[in-house]
Amino acid sequence: PVQVPVRAPAQQTVEAARPVRTTGEQPLAGRRALVTGGASGIGAATVRAFAAQGAHVTVADRDGDGAAALAEEVNGDSWTVDLLGTGDLEDLSLDVDILVNNAGIQAVQPIHTFDPAAFRRIHTLMLEAPFLLIRAALPAMYDRGFGRIINLSSIHGLRASPFKAAYVSAKHGLEGLSKVTALEGGEHGVTSNCVNPGYVRTPLVENQISDQARLHGITEEDVLSTIMLTESAIKRMVEPEEVAALVCWLASDVAGMVTGSSYVMDGGWSAR
Ligand code: NAD
């Protein structure tokens, strides 16, 4: 069995029908959160934002050093875990109020030569692992009558781009998983939603620019201007902190009627 370091903060109170907290600077006070892929990018911004709003956060990442350093910064815990090892997750039970399925990778290849192993890795990390973590977290959420599941999808959970067969299909699958979780969890006080960013300034995006340039036959500068920004109304990338603010809101008490939804933050990219 996998040991997950999630400790209850001193101020944790758990009552099923808790009043909605609409005010105050710490709307997540007393909440325990787990953020996968929490050591970098959107995950790290979410960890910091959760902590600033009063939550106790466990940073889960295969980058154990990065997770530990951030956990120390926010007075949380870290869990070094390779989420591709999904066999280990089958016996897991998680005791958290908020689960953020965020860990992700990308592979940019045409379908007719797409590496099957890379396809499977993406689906394992970005669809099967979220399923297993949701499965592990729901029993305690159901017992408490409260839970917030936030799945980092993408504009590619709703729309497609060439050369991203694995990513697009995994994210579309995650959208379905999130909705089923919402339908089953509703009567237990559990909400489940997707967050769908456009291009966010993180290593995940920076690492795909050279492959995109080669496959589209354009320069790396043109990848940024043509593919990532031309379609957007607000001609810049999304910042991780902007996504984290949306995740915080979905995790808060006031978002209790928001479930089974997908929240796009793409500077207008998908409005066109
Ligand atoms: P990132 O590369 O900055 O961070 C991803 C984190 O996941 C890293 O800390 C990495 O160590 C961790 N990770 C990767 N494989 C793992 C594994 N096997 N086990 C455990 N941890 C693992 O990426 P990001 O841009 O912050 O992306 C976070 C999420 O947001 C992803 O699901 C991504 O698909 C989604 N997203 C990103 C963008 C974007 O433009 N950056 C846009 C839409 C959606």
Image: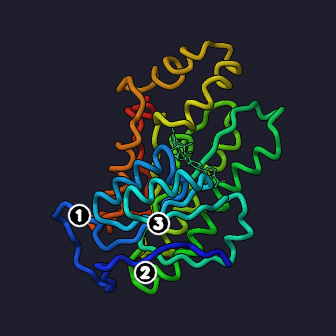
Foreground pick, 137 / 66: 66
Q: Residue at x 54, y 44 (%)?
A: 158
Disc on res. 188: 2
- Compare marks 2 and 3 and give the one earlier in the sequence: 3
Marks 2 and 3, how far apart in space? 27 Å
Give the amino acid type for the residue marked by disc 2 in the picture: His
Looking at the rendered structure, the secondary structure element under dot 1 is loop
Give yes or no for contact between labels 2 and 3 (Cβ–Cβ under 8 Å).
no
Give yes or no for contact between labels 2 and 1 (Cβ–Cβ under 8 Å).
no
Image coordinates of residue 79 in percent, x first then y, are: 56, 64
Q: In the rendered view, would you say 106 is above or below 185?
A: above
Q: Local crowd at mark 2 within 10 Å, few (<14), some, or many (≥20)?
A: some
Give the amino acid type for the residue marked by disc 1 in the picture: Gln
Marks 3 and 1, how far apart in space? 19 Å
- Compare marks 3 and 1 and give the one earlier in the sequence: 1
Disc 1 C-beta below 8 A from ligand 1? no
Q: Which residue is mark 1?
A: 26
